[in-house]
Amino acid sequence: MLSSTPAELVPAPGHDDEFASLFPEGATLDLLAEGGTWFEGPTWTGEDEIVWSDVVGNRLLVWTPQQGAGILLEPSHHQNGHTVDNHGRLVAASHGERAVVRRELDGSWHVLVDRHEGRRFNSPNDLVVDSHDAIWFTDPRYGIDKPEEGYGGTVEMDGCRVYRLTPDGNATAVTPPHPGPNGLAFSPDESVLYLADSEVGHILAFEVLDGGARLGEPVTFARLDPGPPDGIRVDPQGRVWTSCASGIQVFAARGPSEPGERLGSVAVPQRTANLAFGGPEGKTLAITATSGLYRLQTR
């Protein structure tokens, strides 16, 4: 650990006690690693191991308390978001390969999908895995439009959507085009899918229908100020935690057609990209913010 400072917890009006109860007394924001250009996509690959991307630096990094920070894969083909599937395999959204890729248990990587209806994806950005082993991922154009975040190339898709990849390799578009689809997360019972649109500055909520085969009409769950939202995670009680320019914002759980209510925020000293719960009890947040990897204990 490079440094530790008291966490700056800012409750929303009327939510002082409720927000404070989410964190242990004396909670700290711990800087674990630094030196990146744009850190993204953290995930816990073990109780004390965090993997994350330096998207612009084209590296996949790993941290443990015993070894500190190191390089897991270089070049990483500008991987962005990560998650671990139900079988313990690391799954990545690759800007450079314009694909969803997976690291097998033997350490080898392979492409799961890089096309839909014969056309190459834009640059898959973030992803989640549901209880049926389907991978849901967003496909904005950052890896094409921002040469430092990918290899560029020709746009083949007619928009930026959310896709669902089933275990048999079939990918389907589950949303119409959105300006900047980014972070994804499910409610605990997988009845609601949350989507951060970083270009518009809001989080949408979709009711999940027909066992995940389709989504209902989107409802605006929250508009972030300051924004924009990027990564999203949902805790076991259904609260929505999202990253933004100033740090982390937390919203109370609501039904699929109801707007969220902001409970408070956690200040982070750098523009915050993404977050993931993990650690020994699943209560520790790994946070990527510009050039730093941070850790925050929660309840």
Image (cartoon, grey):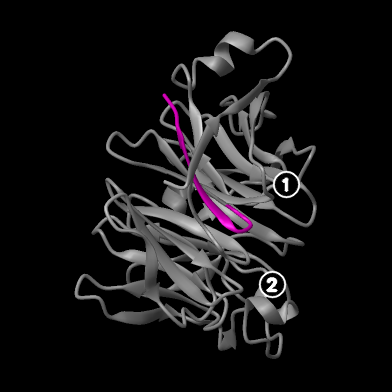
Q: Residues within 10 Å of mark 2 (few under 14, many from 20)?
A: some
Horizontal relation, residue 207 to residue 281: left or right: right
Foreground of the two, 1 or 248: 1
Residues drawn in magenta: 289-299
The numbered dot on residue 4 is none
- Is 273 rendered above or below residue 263? below
Main SS of residues in magenta: strand
Q: Quadrant of residue 277?
A: top left
- Amino acid at dot 2: Tyr
Q: Residue at x 42, y 35 (%)?
A: 188
Kindly identify which residue carries mark 2: 142
Foreground of the two, 66 or 257: 66
Q: Position of residue 61 (x, y in %)?
A: 42, 66
Reading the chain from its start, which is encountered first: label 1 or label 2?
A: 2
- Amino acid at dot 1: Ala
Quadrant for the C terminus in the image:
top left
Kindly identify which residue carries mark 1: 245
Q: Residue at x 33, y 41 (%)?
A: 279
